[in-house]
Amino acid sequence: MQLTNYTEYALRVLLFLGALEPGEKTNIKEISRAFSISENHLSKIVYELGKEGFIETIRGRNGGIRLAKKPEDIRIGVVVRHTEDNLSLVECFAGHGNHCIITPVCGLKHVLHEALEAFLRVLDSYTLADLLANKNHLQSIFQQKRV
């Protein structure tokens, strides 16, 4: 199983914003420069993160983006569920299009479902604040990219 780049970049955006001082704003250009990710791609991600209430986007001359919640209120599992389109590990997980002939008697799907639930449970046990335990180091790295 591999998370999509979309999810990975969404988590990077949250880490970048979480490394800022409380209330401090930044913009897509700075995040793009820090991670060498396309501004267009990040715009879509920022829009979705804003729509889901993880970040706040402020328009205008003094606008920017910042976290909309405290880092301790952002669960990593929730972010992953919002950003991943498809957590179906195998064909039989999908609601339609399952052509596997052994689905009715297969034990594998139950094992994989249990594994997926365990994976998400672990992610749910962490918040953005947990990932920011090394905030000073992150700030240092991001500051180098801002110059």
Image (spheres, grey):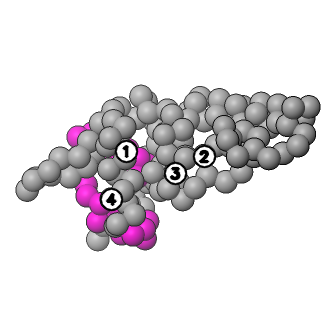
Q: Give whichever of discs 4 and 3 has the lower sequence position.
A: 3
Rendered view: 43 above or below 132: below
Task: Please tell me how crowded label 2 is: few (under 14), some (14-19), or many (20+) other residues with Cα within 10 Å.
Answer: few
Going by the numbered disc 4, the residue's amino acid type is Ser
Mark 4 and mark 3 residues within 8 Å of each other at the beta carbon: no
Q: Which residue is mark 4?
A: 43
Q: Going by the image, does 25 lie left or right of 97?
A: left
In the image, what residue type sits under mark 2? Asn
Spot occupied by residue 30 in the image (x, y as percentages of width and height) = 30, 64
The CA distance from mark 4 to mark 2 is 21 Å
In the depicted structure, whether residue 79 falls above or below residue 34: above
Mark 2 to mark 1 CA distance (whole Å): 17 Å
Q: Is residue 31 magenta?
A: yes
Looking at the picture, tell me which residue is in the foreground, 90 or 5: 90
Tag of residue 49? 1
Considering the numbered disc 2 on the image, is that residue within a helix, a strand or a loop? loop
Q: Residue at x 70, y 46 (%)?
A: 97
Q: CA distance from mark 1 to mark 4?
A: 10 Å
Q: CA distance from mark 3 to mark 2?
A: 11 Å
Viewer-side label of 4, 2: 2
Q: What is the magenta range?
A: 13-38
Residue type, mark 1 in image: Leu
Tell me the residue at 91%/31% (across/down): 105
Which quadrant is the C terminus positioned in? Answer: bottom left
| Marks 3,1: beta carbons within 8 A | no
Q: Amino acid at mark 3?
A: Thr
Residue annotated with mark 2: 86
- Secondary structure beneath dot 1 equals helix
- Label 3: which residue? 7
Query: In the drawing, does residue 45 fall left or right of residue 96?
Result: left
Label 3 vs label 2, nearer the camera: 2
Dividing the picture into quadrants, the one containing residue 37 is bottom left
